[in-house]
Image: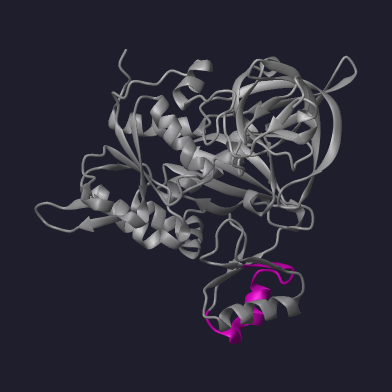
Amino acid sequence: MSDNKFIIGSEEWCAFPALGVPAIKARVDSGARTSSIHAVNIRPFKREGEPWVSFELHPIQNSRKIILKCESKVVDRRSVKSSNGESEKRYVIASVIQLGGHAWEVELTLTNRDSMGYRMLLGREAMSNKTLVDPSESFCLGDQNDLEVEALYGVKTAKKSGLKIGLLASNPDLYSNQRIIEAGEQRGHEMVFLNISQCYLKLDASSPEVHYRGGTVLNDVDAVIPRIRPSMTFYGCALTRHFESLNIEALNTSDAITRSRDKLFSLQLLQKNNLDIPTSGFANSPVDTKDLIDMVGGAPLIVKLLEGTQGKGVVLAETTKAAESVINAFKSLRVNLLVQEFIKEAQGKDLRCFVIDGKVVASIERTAAPGEFRANIHMGGSASIVSVSAAERQLAIKAAKTMGLRVAGVDIIRSSRGPLLLEINSSPGLEGIESATGIDIAGAMIESIEKKLGWKAEE
């Protein structure tokens, strides 16, 4: 063994002093050529004529308590093939890495590693002539627990003297759910993740109860935040309704969620309240297909499954023949669908306004991926900050109020005849809008519960 090489394991704690990173857990991978570090909101700029990049870094895996705002000179921009085989063009920066008592400069590509197991990957170029890897070992240079790492970043654990809030959802690993849990804990509340499918109800006139797996009674929570996936709408709303019957505050009520989830009913409510929507049609019989197409102005047109979500179950029919085929095919499957006019001038863009307690707290413009007409982030769309007009702001607020939602993601499309309401979401995602705007929306949701219950933090 060469004297100037030291042994590292399959995972190690690293530091990057120039980036303000005292500790980040890295996956050591000699099979990967380049090293990468987790970065979001990556924005290039010029400094004294040189290319630089700013970005945000969440250094602790599965946590967004810490947000580091970093800047670095760009040394390259190159295509990198990820582990799933997809090629991505990334900015490359150089920074000094500290591993144990050793330090040297390495190149890092910037990419979003939220879906990866580690916020950093240490590749073989960075290790060349410096280390030997023992894949059977971990943390050869020392391990650190969560509290020790948080202390390095100056994170203080909030005293839990607040409310007990249950988050009703299905996946604890989703960005939105993690952010809500973290936001509540940072404000001193006891946050409890409640998997909807593992809750069950006791219906009894004198002692109704909500139970959780193993028989734990949940009647002691002060409030619940329903984040119900579409496939769990019936059961999730029944569960939320039961909490409400126990006088437990629900951020969005079961009635409001039920209204918003029924796309046809919600459009009828919006129309009844004189809110502008795209011309839409609904029919049961295939005999009416031609008139249904003419009703919305002919092709091209949009066909939507009433049970679809996140852009799924939405089809663009570009010709009358294609529209007839799609509509009749869906009807043969006995599914409910809407036919809706296609707003060509929107050019694959829409607005997402996030409404909390009758105010638009954040808004973004979503742009569809190339070759795609749906602007949903889950369908590969991108998000950018946008300034909405007074009319668009009022339209979003009125839409949320019509549905009875205290928290809503309101989707608006800009047409030649003014803004039109597309959809109101009772469980809007936070990642795209928080990343684009930098606004603490999860914290605003918790604050809404505090105000409703009249809770104030201890001085």
Location of residue 422 in the rendering, given as x and y in whole percent from the top left corner: 59, 55
Q: Residue at x 35, y 60 (%)?
A: 235
Quick check: 50 left or right of 153?
right
Q: Residue furthest front?
A: 1
Q: Residue at x 67, y 67 (%)?
A: 315
Most foreground residue, 372 or 355: 372
Most foreground residue, 150 or 395: 150
Q: Is residue 304 above or below residue 365?
A: below
- Quarter of the image for residue 182 reads top left
Quick check: 207 left or right of 278?
left
- Quarter of the image for residue 94 reads top right
Most foreground residue, 123 or 194: 123
**What colour scheme has been applied to the protein in the rendered image?**
one colour
The answer to whether residue 302 is magenta is: yes
Location of residue 75 in the rendering, given as x and y in whole percent from the top left corner: 85, 26
Location of residue 154 in the rendering, given as x and y in whole percent from the top left corner: 50, 15
The answer to whether residue 371 is magenta is: no
Q: Which residues are magenta?
A: 284-303
Most foreground residue, 168 or 332: 168
Q: Residue at x 23, y 57 (%)?
A: 201
Q: Residue furthest right?
A: 49
Task: Please indicate, yes or no, whether residue 155 appears anywhere in the rendered image.
Answer: yes
Task: Please indicate, yes or no, whether residue 275 appears anywhere in the rendered image.
Answer: no
